[in-house]
Amino acid sequence: MSTVAARVAGATKVYGEGEAAVTALDDLTVEFEQGRFTAIMGPSGSGKSTLLHCIAGLDTLTEGSAFIGEVNLGELNEKDLTLLRREKVGFIFQAYNLIPTLNAAENITLPIDIAGDVPDQEWFDTVVDTIGITDRLSHRPAELSGGQQQRVAAARALVSRPAIVFADEPSGNLDSKSGAELLGFMRHAVDEFGQTIVMVTHDPIGAAYADRIVFLGDGRLVGELLDPTADQVFEHLKSMGD
Amino acid sequence: MLKIALRSVLLHKLRLTLTGVAIILGVAFVSGTFVFTDSIKASFDDLFSDVNSQVDFYVRGTSEFGSSAAILEESVVEAIRSIEGLDAVVPSVDGIAQLIDKEGEPIGGAGPPTLGFSYLPEGEGLTPLEVRQGDSWPTGAGQIVVDTFAADANDLAVGDVIDVITPIGVEPFEIVGIATFGEADNLLGATLAVFEFEEAQRVFDMEGMVSSISLTVGDGVDRALLQPLIADQLPDQVEIVTAEEQTDDDLAEVDEGVGFINTILLVIAGVAVFVGAFIIQNTFRIIVAQRTKELAMLRAVGATGRQVTFMVGIEALVVAIVASAIGIGVGVLLAIGIKGVFTAFGFGFPGGPLTIKARTIVVGLTVGVVVTLISALLPARKASKIPPIAALRDVATSTKDLSRRLVAGLVVTALGVVLLAVGLLLNVDNAISYVGFGALLTFVGVSILAPLFARAFARTAGKPLPRFGGIVGRLAQENAMRKPRRTAATASSLMIGVALVSVIAVFSASAKAGVAEVFEDDFKTDFQVVLDGFSDPRFTGLSPALTDELRQVDELSVVTRVRIGEYRTTDGEMAEKFLIGVDGGIDQVINLDIVEGLFGDFTDGTALLLEEEADRLGLGAGDSMTIEVPSGVTVELEIAGVFAGDALGVPLVIPLETYKEHITFRLDRWIFALKADDVTEAEARAAVDVVAESYPNARVTNTEELISDIEEQIDSLLNLLIVLLGFAIVIALLGIVNTLVLSVSERKREIGLLRAVGTTRKQVKRMIRWESVLIAVFGGVLGLVVGTVLGVATVAAVGQGLKIAIPIGQLITYLVVAAIGGVIAAIPPSRTGAKTNVLEAIAYE
């Protein structure tokens, strides 16, 4: 029985008011287990990004609660949320992941430096080595390919040993080869380092790297797949479409 | 295109507001200056027209220049009275009379004149003076009428007895009335004292003489026929003018005083506009850079480069017109403010509405629009060169050819330096314009060069940042370095203000050092008696009675008086200069350093000439020279000697007898004294103090005290100028705000990412603050370097009486102030930065 790294309970998120109100999350309850790679899928507007933002402490719920570990995000003020993100959470966004003025190594240690801590050199080397960017560390983002940039972002997300890593379409901007490399690396991090990862994606092949897929539709949980293959994902999406 | 431009203006309100502020401030200063000075002139115009409306003619001593008109013999009055057709012939006597308040402190005198007039019953209604309290005019000895302003400010009432300093000494007078000058309660801070006619002649040391005569013509008499008849009766150096001419002359005098204020304010306005131009240019450049994609898209769908330029230009034009209009409005408020400040400092002027001339509006709008358009021109041209392909690619800002920038910067700087050199070193007309334009070009040149060392500066000066600011400091340093042109342009606007302040600081430090050196080396006196505080030598002075009294003091062996006058050279230049008249052994109290001729030959009708002036005129001892005195008379002087000493600070020294013969000013400027051999310095000082005590406007010093007095005066002048130039620095700080707000909005994603990965708002603020401080310190350093170089060059060029000194402590203070300014300027952008919405910033478009 694995413990829960993050969860939402009765999560509702409404944007706008009155007639213009849009319900992005509708009384959603879902858990993400520790040490596993979970993918969130669903059509556009199904609330998958909203869920990611709310559970990562970037956005707040209208109703219900979100937890990272035992911490109820709704009880934290802005500053504590920031500190929580710094210490417990890693991010990989679809694009604009890196600070252009810092080189790759500095970007990787950014959350640790912001906290004023000293990076664990051994762990840093392990991550950088695994990710295969050892020779690009002194380059600035502009001198890296898109795939390399995303791998630097992944390294940054891992190097502070966060409780959970959130990835929002991390391979969305990459060609299939680079995308596969990045996802393979994320899979590796889960298997070898026991990292918890939650990833939003609309790519069935990408989702197949996960241990578990949760499907959202209109802000609700509409399905789930364990140890999926790409074909199963295709099938499932097809059935959802029917 | 026009529609797109207008939309764009509305869309980008924030950044355009900030640009607008720079224009508004510049235009406000220009128009405020005009409104202020026009209002003063208009109120004096009304006042003098009113004042002179009852009189037909004035008979007066001639006055070609300066402020010391010829004096009339009283016999002229009788001669005129014998002419038929005149109703009233009223002589008046004017002089300088300084009131002393009940605490024994002199009233006024620090700048504005302390005027004295005479009263005759038959002049009632002809003079501008009107008694407001106490219904009596002075009718005999010991009586006085003072003006409302002086009375109100010093709690004087009818019946009070006050001391008054006049050329004949200090005497008590009873106040019998309080008067106004026409409708005005206050004439730019001047004080008035009115004496009975004969009493006025006595106290002004003008017995048997008058200053002017007011005439009214009888009914039915042809004024045009009468004027030449009267003119025929007048001796040399006496003239007749109509009331209108007198009004014009009075106004010209006001104009001269106001013109000085006008010039100073306009120079500051010019600096404000110049600094504003930098900010406007920088803002438009950033806007164009940020809109590269949008503009390239327009190009891609077929807009020509010219159309893109036009679009940016229209945007600038709209902002310029709106901001200039607001600027004129703010200028009016500023004028009210300046008026308030002047009144608060005792330089009030006659009431009256604010005068807003069409010229003010035209100049304000023109300045605002032209400066904005010129500033936006370069960015607009750059916009037109954006290739359509830029719409598809991420912006690859082309790094411009550095060597081209280097050459351009050096050429412009060199041109500026050459103009400065011409203005400072060569004896050209309009030297000030050369210097001003040279300084302007130097600033532009340095600002062109600045991006070349912006990166190096941020790298060096920002070095400690990462060490104690961690990654946040490092980011700030990197941000300051990433757009060197932007950093440099923003810093350059601050450079101007700091440079000007530094020039003044270097100049005043050098002046102080020079004064100290000259006085220490060349003053042989034990004591000096000077006017207390800062004062205009043409309008005030020490009563000659003080010198006379000091000559009775046994503890002193030598007492020398120095009087200041104006003269004009009679060579082609006709330059107005100061001379001094002396008596009683000037060579014993001051080291004149006679290099040619003999002091012994310095007698009535001769002169001592400064070596430089002698060289310029090609004259030497034994030659004769001709000068023109204020009454218009030319005087021939034999040069007794040529002196090289700097201590007197004037080119020409004449004996007091000669002075009195040609110049009508009656007050002493300085008294130099040597103690007698058989007394101690303390004894002599005590004796001098006893005498001087009854003359409250006199200050007794020894050389050391005199030096520190003058240093204090220089400092207070310096502080005043710094306060005025502070405006330029405030505008430049607005420029930093502007740049950083734009940069922050440009880096929204980056800041959002930083926030997402755990950067606190405080840290974001700190990052922006450090960047701001780096920019400010860069501007400060540039300003200090340019300012110190310009300052030293100016001091070296002026030379006389100055000794190059660089006030390092003061300059460092300016740098610290600039850095603090950077912290303050960072407040708005750091707030914007801290508020960055993480979700919006990381959203993928």
Image (cartoon, coloured by chain):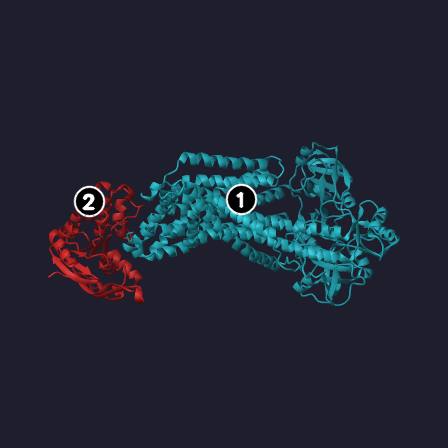
Task: Answer with the quarter of the image where residue B452 lies.
Answer: top left
Regarding residue A118, the answer to whether it shows in the image is yes
Residue designated by label 2: A178
The chain containing the residue under callout 2 comes to A
Q: Secondary structure at mark 1?
A: helix
Report whether residue B817 is seen: no
Chain B: colour as depicted: cyan
Place of residue B631 in the rendered image (x, y in percent of width and height, measured from the top left): 76, 45
* Colour chain A appears in: red
Judge left or right: residue A55 versus residue B3: left
Taking the image as shown, residue B193 lies to the left or right of residue B5, namely right
Element under label 2? helix
Q: Residue at x 19, y 60 (%)?
A: A216
Q: Image check: B483 left or right of B252? A: left
Instruction: Pinpoint the chain carrying mark 1.
Output: B
Residue type, mark 1 in image? Val
Rendering coords of residue B555 (x, y %): 71, 50
Q: Amino acid at mark 2?
A: Ser
Considering depth in this image, is B213 or B523 the residue closer to the camera? B213
Q: Counting other residues with Cα less than 10 Å from the Cα at mark 1, is it few (<14), some (14-19), or many (20 or more)?
A: many
Q: Nearer the viewer, residue B435 or B821?
A: B435
Q: Which residue is mark 1?
A: B503
